[in-house]
Image: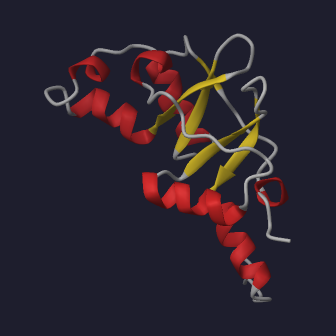
Amino acid sequence: MAPQVKDVMGRRAVALAEATPVARVAWALRVYAEAAMPVVDGEGRVVGIVSEDDVLVREWARAPLPAKASGTTAAQIMTRPALTVRMDTTVREAAELMHEHGVRVMPVVEPASGRMLGLLRRSDLLRLVTELRGEEVPAA
């Protein structure tokens, strides 16, 4: 059977509330070393994703995207809807989606509620590739 997202995803994930100030978003991305983080509503449902690019656009690209440039919260600068996957999605399908849409992180959601269950990162896919090939990974 083909590996599924549930086999490789990170179950520990930090999400941001819609009202999170942009300065706190930038801090969280840096401290947690994430390229992007899900934004959730009060019920824990993924409503968007905020990336390093979203924060940087707000700071330096005022003309091209004025709505994001003037945003002060995660909800105002996030990309919506977030590209998400389910736990039973095959890793191949998820990898193709990530490549096709140019994303490095995808929230894994419960289909019925839209609540976040974890994150699938490109690093999870790379780890699987090395495991499948039986390659030893040197210590950092």
Q: Is residue 113 above or below residue 8?
A: above
Q: Residue 139 is drawn in which quadrant? A: bottom right
When the figure is inspected, residue 52 is found, relative to residue 59, above or below; the finding is: below
Asked if residue 11 shows in the view, the reply is yes
In the visual, does 112 lie left or right of 64? right
Q: How far across and how far down the image is residue 59, in percent? A: 28, 29
Q: Residue at x 47, y 27 (%)?
A: 80
Q: Quadrant of residue 135?
A: bottom right
Which residue lies most toward the left here? 63
- Within the image, what quadrant is residue 102 found in? bottom left
Residue 87, x across and y down, in percent: 79, 47
- Work out which quarter of the rendered image holds the C terminus and state it: bottom right
Q: Residue 66 in the image: x percent, y percent?
A: 21, 20
- Residue at 62% from the left image edge and 40% from the top image edge: 84
| x and y, in percent, of residue 104 in the image | 53, 53
Is 70 placed above or below 85 here? above
Q: Residue at x 73, y 83 (%)?
A: 137
Task: Please give the count of numbered marks on the rendered protein.
Answer: 0
Image quadrant where one finds the N terminus: bottom right
Q: Is residue 33 visible?
A: no
Q: How is the image coloured?
A: secondary structure
The residue closer to the viewer here, 9 or 136, is 9
